[in-house]
Image (cartoon, rainbow, N blue to C red):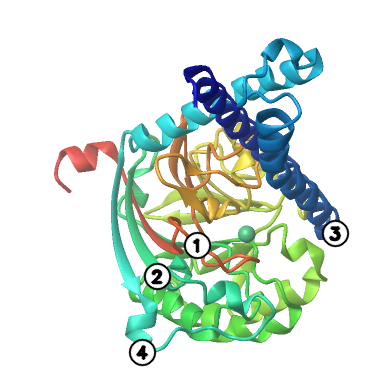
Amino acid sequence: MPTEAWLNAALLFAVFAGHCELMAAWCNRFHGLKVRHRVTAKVRAVHDLLVFGAIPGLLFGFGLFGYRLLRGGEWSAVPWGWKAYFALCGLGVISLLVCTARNLFRPLPTGVRREGRRIDVTAELGFKPIGTGRRRHQAAAPWNGQFTLEAVELELTLPDLPPGWDGATIGHVSDSHFQGEVGLPFFERAFTELAAWRCDLYVFTGDLLDKPARIDWIAPTFGQLTATNPAFGCRFILGNHDWHYDVAPLRAAMTAAGWGDVSGRVETLLRGGDPLALAGDESPWLNGPPDWSQAPPDAFRLLLAHTPDLYPRAKREGVNLMLAGHNHGGQITLPLIGPVYAPSQHGVRHAGGTYREGALLMHVSRGLSGRQPLRYGAVPEVTRITLRRPDDRANGA
Ligand SMILES: [Fe+2]
């Protein structure tokens, strides 16, 4: 093949990569909206058609036949409309390079210490806990990381943390997506890990289930947890997948399991006489933003939000620490590039991990499962967070 044909092949490949990035960016932002499953399913079908259809389109329509760019054809023959779209795909390539650099070089924010421990749940149980359901073949896919749990321990140094809260521990779990393909034993193991940490407070940040019949899994999982400090207990909010069902029985079942509903509310917790205002925000799907004026003015502000997209409002409202889920770490990550899909207005920027946005520190859990029980490069997560004051750490406390 002549040099010019190789160059055109490289250009067509770049166009394809940029096109895929644009389609993913559009799909991500659409999935971050308040829309029903039936609508998102149609959008995903269009996305799949445009992504997979681009392969024969570019290869045959522009490369081998049509404009014959791989067989001596000239770009001058390509209509301006297509050239304009290909230039747009160039922006997609730049976005892809930025995402890759962010994935490779994003450091932990200042004041964050992280340790992770992998638990091979299949090896521990002696069997892969695959249940029933039409997506069980996805769960059984080779190298699926769905049944590897990461126990993440975070130590967060927070400048505005009151002295009474130094050393307090929070167990964070998100996105259980009880559905059936991932069997109950997997979730029981995850909650056993959380229980063993004996945290002062446990929190859940939404997407409880994808099948209402699985409501009976709440008792053997969430019901296992008892906060070390009975005054704090366990608190939850719901997420966009819960929004598709009647949420009243879900909230009632969580309450019966010992979990307090903090959605759209502010509660003040005292430790060592110091106040911490704990609030929940299920926007844009269920109960909206809390009224922070109900919190003592000097209270440390901890927000539970399902989607990390709420971080700009949290920043404006002076939230110190925000815990979220929703993005599942992207569920599938590509080598070097990292996550590609996340249902967010900010794309994969907050797919999973700990982020600093101005004075706000935010941890986005990868959660436990998903509607699609597939995990590659983004294994399920349970998290223990230890709150620290800067002075106490400097003194070695
Ligand atoms: Fe989710």
Name the secondary structure under disc 2: strand
Residue matched to label 3: 38
Residue matched to label 1: 375
Q: Amino acid at mark 4?
A: Gly
Name the secondary structure under disc 1: loop
Per the model, the C-alpha gap separating discs 3 and 4 is 38 Å
Residue matched to label 2: 148
Q: Quadrant of residue 81?
A: top right
Per the model, the C-alpha gap separating discs 2 and 1 is 9 Å
Q: Does 2 appear above or below 250?
A: above
Whichever of callouts 3 and 4 sits on the residue coming sooner in the sequence is 3
Per the model, the C-alpha gap separating discs 4 and 2 is 13 Å
Per the model, the C-alpha gap separating discs 1 and 3 is 23 Å
Tell me if label 2 and label 1 are in contact, CB under 8 Å. Answer: yes
Tell me if label 4 and label 1 are in contact, CB under 8 Å. Answer: no
Whichever of callouts 2 and 3 sits on the residue coming sooner in the sequence is 3
Q: Is mark 2 within 8 Å of ligand 1?
A: no
The image quadrant in which ligand 1 is located: bottom right
Residue 181 drawn at (x, y percent): 60, 79
Per the model, the C-alpha gap separating discs 2 and 3 is 31 Å
Q: Residue furthest top?
A: 76
